[in-house]
Image (cartoon, grey):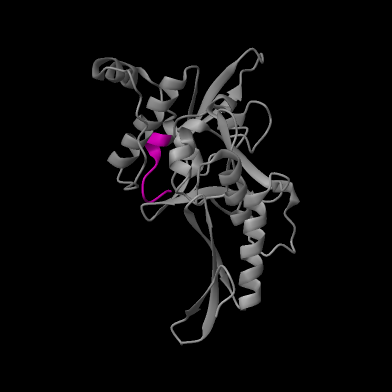
Amino acid sequence: MSLPGVFIARKKDRSVYYRASVTVREKHISLGSYPTESEAHMAYKEARMISGTNSVKLEDYADTSSLSFSKWVVLVNFRDNGLYFAMPIYLKNKYFLYYLSPSRCLKFDIDDLFYYSSKKIMCRGGRLFVNDYGMQCSILNRYGIKNYAVCGKDYRFINGDATDFRYENIEVLNRFHGLTCIPSKDRSGFLYKVRIHIRSSYVVGIYKEETEAAIAYNKAADILKKNGINRNFAQNYIEGLSPAVYADIYSKLEISPAIFRLTPENT
């Protein structure tokens, strides 16, 4: 007979392993798989301890714990807040914490709770992403920030905390493709330098207005396509601009003469 909270299971090769689970407030919670019955039972006992006393905190987790840290967070949150999430989320007032590890957690607005409660956040090469309908999506995309945007150049964390993803803490500096904010010569403001990439980057021009710079990138892409450079240039979409106004700005924008000279043979 199995120990409490432990169930015998078999792999495809028929070898035995053990699964642990616990029931808290009529909620059945899986605790994971273990190679031995005693390890699975220890996980069950640990889960019962967390659920049964408020004295156990998130910071009490240790490397020697039988449970994974993710399960530890799930159980503490369920005990303290009465809401079950499969992801390592801990609710706070008006925001929540999503734990990547015992020493690293991300802070999100409560409005994002439904989205992240079913999404595992992963980190690769310093990039945070989730799998969304089979695609890897950067969590920055939810703020209108492009893939591979550079912190400090394309966006910034207002309070300096790069783990604080609340909307009030993220300022988008560059919403469009090909644009880089640069200080004006007198340092009184910013200008927008536009580059377009083929095999290397080519300067399209420098513009005072962000909208003009975004349209300049589109115009440069159109010129290159007419010259036979068949690249999948992303187009900048400018909201709130009528076709007539867009066409007027487009026609008046000056583009670097070097862009007009580029062909498939010399790029």
Main structural element of the magenta stretch: helix, strand or loop?
Answer: loop
Q: Quadrant of residue 62?
A: bottom right
Q: Quadrant of residue 251?
A: top left
Indicate the position of residue 88 as horizontal and vertical percent values: 57, 49
Indicate the position of residue 36 as horizontal and vertical percent values: 62, 78
Query: Over which residues does the magenta segment extend?
Result: 259-267
Indicate the position of residue 163 as horizontal and vertical percent values: 64, 38
The foreground one among 267 and 111 is 111
For the view shown, which residue lies furthest in the front direction?
A: 1
The foreground one among 152 and 177 is 152
In the displayed structure, does residue 224 sit left or right of residue 80? Answer: left
Q: Give the residue drawn at x 64%, y 17%.
A: 185
26 is higher (above) or lower (below) than 5? above
118 is higher (above) or lower (below) than 249? below
Q: Is residue 93 visible?
A: yes
The quarter of the image holding the N terminus is bottom right
Indicate the position of residue 159 as horizontal and vertical percent values: 67, 26
Q: Give the residue drawn at x 60%, y 25%.
A: 182
Q: Give the residue drawn at x 51%, y 86%.
A: 15
Q: Is residue 266 magenta?
A: yes
Q: Give the residue drawn at x 47%, y 17%.
A: 209
44 is higher (above) or lower (below) than 191? below
Q: Quadrant of residue 258?
A: top left
